[in-house]
Amino acid sequence: MPGPNDALETILERGRPADETDALLAALVDGGVYVPINGQGSVVFLRVDDTGPVLPGYTSEASCQRLLRDAAGSVFCDALRLLDIAEHTGIQTLAVFAVQEWAKVPLPLVSRTLRVRGMHTQGDQTMRLAWSTHPVAVALRNAFAARILAHPQVQTVWIAQARWLESGHEHLMVSMSVDDGAGPAAHVLLDTVLAEDVPLGPESPKLGLQVFEPHQADQAAQLDSFGLDTVRIDRSTGRVHIFSHEFD
């Protein structure tokens, strides 16, 4: 099990979460939290004000034991697992606790941060990418093929089924190679596709985005060896090429 989320605790204990929202969300997505459970193994929810129940998360097992003595224990939850709990319970607010300070975090912001940060984590976690036949993956491939020419700073798009080997969580991963400094162009392309072509609903798989600039060319090149659905611009001809097992 991962250790304490020291980065998140440091931010919370400074007592200015509203001024450090981006850093707090990044630390939460990178390091996860510990969620309390009862004797039957079910998640324990709390009320911290008059707005309704929240999903509590603690920066360490020790802080959960110290601050919530009625809990039978705690389980480590990464961002994907927190979003799974929210989806199944309807609770859309996370309350994160350190030793002295705490803050409320809307879980839709966690989902957004998870996508923007490309599912990177701090630990030695392994993500396996594979070809996906999921209807959302196919729809994404076709939508990117139709729109990539309008976003010339994006060179290649890969769509994959991603599985974290340590936790077993799965999601779809979109990877893009872009020109130098063109990371925002990748987000614009994805946001356009999601808004106009492939809207995600409650039953849709979670979606991540990772972006590779030219100095990360070796990492991007590895994706070609995985046999993923790929959309690529041939800049010499201005044509879009689609590579997929579906067409083999």
Image (cartoon, helix red, strand yellow):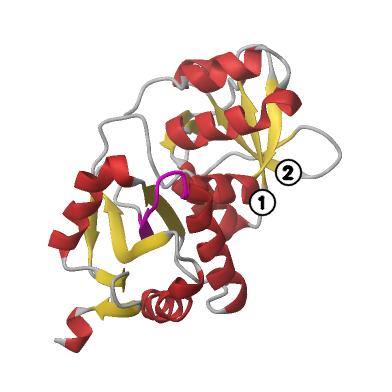
Type of amino acid under label 1: Ile
2 or 1: tag closer to the N-terminus? 2
Horizontal and vertical percent position of residue 207? 45, 60
Please tell me which residue is depicted at 61% across the width and 12% down the height of the picture: 99
Q: Going by the picture, which residue comes out furthest to the right?
A: 50
Residue drawn at x 57%, y 74% is: 199
Image spot of residue 198 (x, y percent)? 53, 76
Q: Is residue 196 one of those drawn in magenta?
A: no
Q: Is residue 8 visible?
A: yes
> Between residues 174 and 15, which one lies in front from this camera angle?
174
Quadrant in which the C terminus is drawn: bottom left
Label 2 close to label 1 by CB (< 8 Å): yes
- Residue drawn at x 44%, y 30% is 31
Left or right of 154, for residue 225:
left
What residue did someone put label 2 on?
53
Instruction: Place residue 97 in its image quadrant.
Output: top right
Which residue is at the front of the view, 108 or 3?
108
The residue closer to the viewer here, 83 or 19, is 19
Look at the image and give the residue range highlighted in magenta.
170-182
> Circle 1 is placed at which residue position?
91
Q: Residues within 10 Å of mark 2 (few under 14, many from 20)?
A: some
- In which quarter of the view is residue 122 placed? top left
